[in-house]
């Protein structure tokens, strides 16, 4: 079965990360599949809202660490990662997310670009970039301080302090909490409420609220340059090797 599942529930397009055996860590082909699905939804009039979802026990464990090692060796940050981030930021359709379990790294930073986030009470959001020898990505260095204030963004992005679902809601990056068994249904209901609104009103309101994406795209690119350099750092190499060879 595919690692990214795309399906429609009425006018809601659901993009589900489906690699539970690896806690939904994202490989380059998975980023490409998600970017393509978002791009196609933007062009499809029948799609009025997107929903990002994961598995019952994991939303997304971030980038696949094996891919990070390969990228460090090749010296290039995978273009599919950037293509996914650009597609998410440029999406003209509202994006709802349903989060259960761990959302790590890009699993958390992608949420900062969503319009409505539902989290199961056991969800945990974390961005261990700096501890891994890396820097924040997905324009989180720009967007997180705006959304949650500098102090909370520093604790999350630099100190790597995880947020529980309740803390994420308190910080303003999660809209609603629910029982973990209800997360997908709650998010889908929210997506359907959005989809039922006048489409042009939603489109224009969203554009007004978000402004032009240029600044965010520029920050994604700026972070990517620093990220690429950090991937090769001794700290990052040591962290990746420690993860790959850890004993359970
Ligand atoms: N890249 C590659 N494989 C990953 C992964 C990742 N980012 N995250 C998890 N996996 C794999 C594990 O290696 C393990 O594979 P195995 O069964 O073949 O050994 C499997 O997924 C299950 O992970 P496990 O760690 O046993 O699950 P857990 O419930 O104990 O912990 C996490 C879940 C998400 C907390 C933990 O896997 C983790 O910290 N992952 C790394 C997250 C990360 O640093 N991402 C990069 C951020 S920039």
Image (cartoon, rainbow, N blue to C red):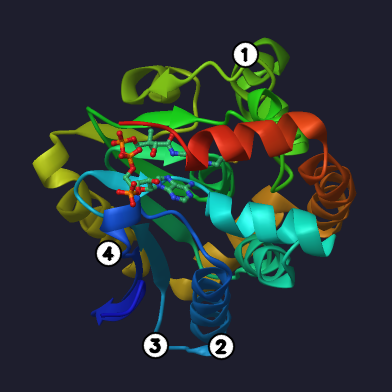
Q: Nearer the viewer, residue 22 or 4?
A: 22
Q: Secondary structure at mark 2?
A: helix
Left or right, 34 with respect to 70, comes to left
Of pointers 1 and 2, the one earlier in the residue sequence: 2
Mark 2 crowdedness (10 Å alpha carbons): few <14, some 14-19, many ≥20: few
For the C terminus, the quadrant is top left
Q: Which residue is mark 4?
A: 192
Residue 86 image point, x, y percent: 71, 66
Q: CA distance from mark 2 to mark 3?
A: 9 Å
Left or right, 241 with respect to 217, comes to left
Disc ID at residue 155: 1
Q: CA distance from mark 1 to mark 4?
A: 34 Å
Q: Which residue is mark 3?
A: 46
* Vertical order, 233 against 221 (above or below): above
- Closer to the camera: disc 3 or disc 1? 1
Please identify the residue farthest to the top as the structure is shown.
151
Residue 215 image point, x, y percent: 86, 51
Disc ID at residue 43: 2
- Closer to the camera: disc 1 or disc 4? 1
């Amino acid at each position: 079965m595919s690692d990214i599942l795309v399906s429609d529930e009425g006018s809601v397009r659901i993009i589900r990360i489906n690699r539970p055996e690896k806690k939904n860590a994202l490989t380059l082909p998975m980023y490409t599949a998600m970017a393509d699905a978002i791009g196609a939804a933007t062009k499809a009039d029948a799609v009025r809202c997107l929903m990002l979802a994961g598995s019952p026990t994991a939303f997304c464990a971030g980038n696949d660490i094996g891919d990070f090692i390969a990228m460090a060796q090749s010296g290039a940050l995978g273009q599919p990662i950037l293509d996914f981030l650009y597609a998410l930021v440029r999406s003209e359709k509202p994006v709802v997310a349903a989060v259960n379990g761990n959302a790590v790294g890009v699993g958390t930073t992608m949420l900062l670009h969503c319009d409505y986030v539902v989290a199961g009470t056991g969800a945990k959001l974390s961005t261990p970039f700096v501890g891994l020898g890396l820097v924040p990505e997905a324009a989180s260095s720009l967007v997180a301080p705006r959304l949650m204030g500098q102090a909370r963004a520093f604790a999350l992005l630099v100190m790597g302090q995880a947020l529980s679902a309740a803390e994420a809601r308190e910080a303003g990056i999660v809209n609603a909490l629910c029982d973990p068994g209800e997360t997908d249904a709650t998010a889908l209901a929210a997506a359907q409420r959005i989809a039922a609104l006048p489409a042009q009103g939603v489109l224009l309101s969203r554009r007004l609220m978000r402004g032009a994406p240029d600044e965010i795209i520029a920050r994604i690119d700026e972070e990517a340059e620093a990220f690429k350099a950090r991937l090769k750092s001794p700290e990052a190499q040591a962290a990746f090797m420690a993860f790959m060879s850890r004993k359970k």
